[in-house]
Image (spheres, helix red, strand yellow):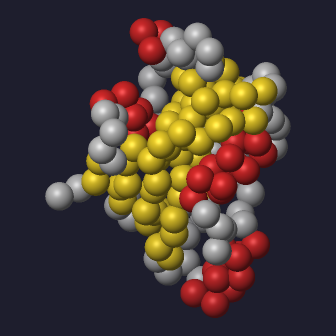
Amino acid sequence: MSRMPIPDFVVRLREKVGHDLIPMTGATGVVRDADGRILLGLRADTGEWALPSGIIEPFEEPAVALAREIEEEAGIGIRVEALVAISATGEIRYPNGDLASYLDFTFTCTHLRGEPHPADGENEEMGWFALDALPPLRASSRFRLEKALAYAGTTWFAR
């Protein structure tokens, strides 16, 4: 399995806190093409199919972060349409012992340009999938896709 790139600000935090829990923010995109297919990536670190996502840098707007992440990971341009869910993960322990939890902003997005490909090494494959032909997805992606498909103008959040 491949090692995922770690943002510089996280590297600096880890120098101070070691493996202790760091709460972070992330953004996930449910990107659809003109045929209604969903963009998925086969993650290099876990070998699981997942929606494209990434860590939001300090002071970065969530939708801007998502567009940047998808450009970096898949080499495509998107338009972020709507915030469909805000959710929190439990504690995640990475193979190196680092602990993190994420507050995630899930957006629906529209594909604008480019053909998806594994542009930065975070994914082994990138591709479009029809809703009735999705590969098995990691649990967080299943949850976020479900919320995006159910979106009717009101952002989901835990109550």
The C terminus lies in which quarter of the figure?
bottom left
The quadrant holding residue 148 is top left
Q: Is residue 79 visible?
A: yes
Q: Residue at x 53, y 15 (%)?
A: 36
Q: Residue at x 43, y 62 (%)?
A: 103
Residue 4's x, y, as percent? 70, 53
The N terminus lies in which quarter of the figure?
top right
Which residue is more in the foreground, 94 or 150? Answer: 150
Q: Residue at x 44, y 37 (%)?
A: 141
Left/right of residue 24 with respect to residue 143 in the rendered view: right
Left/right of residue 141 with respect to residue 155 in the rendered view: right
The residue lying furthest to the bottom in this view is: 16
Left/right of residue 40 with respect to residue 155 in the rendered view: right
The quadrant holding residue 57 is bottom right
How many numbered marks are there? Answer: 0
The residue lying furthest to the left in this view is: 159
The residue lying furthest to the front in this view is: 153
Indicate whether 55 appears above or below 128.
below
The quadrant holding residue 6 is bottom right
Residue 82's x, y, as percent? 48, 43
Left/right of residue 104 with respect to residue 36 in the rendered view: left
Q: Residue at x 66, y 55 (%)?
A: 64
Residue 29's x, y, as percent? 55, 40
Q: Is residue 95 visible?
A: no
Residue 81's x, y, as percent? 54, 39
Which residue is more in the foreground, 27 or 78? Answer: 78
Which residue is more in the foreground, 83 or 57? Answer: 83
Which residue is more in the foreground, 45 or 67? Answer: 67
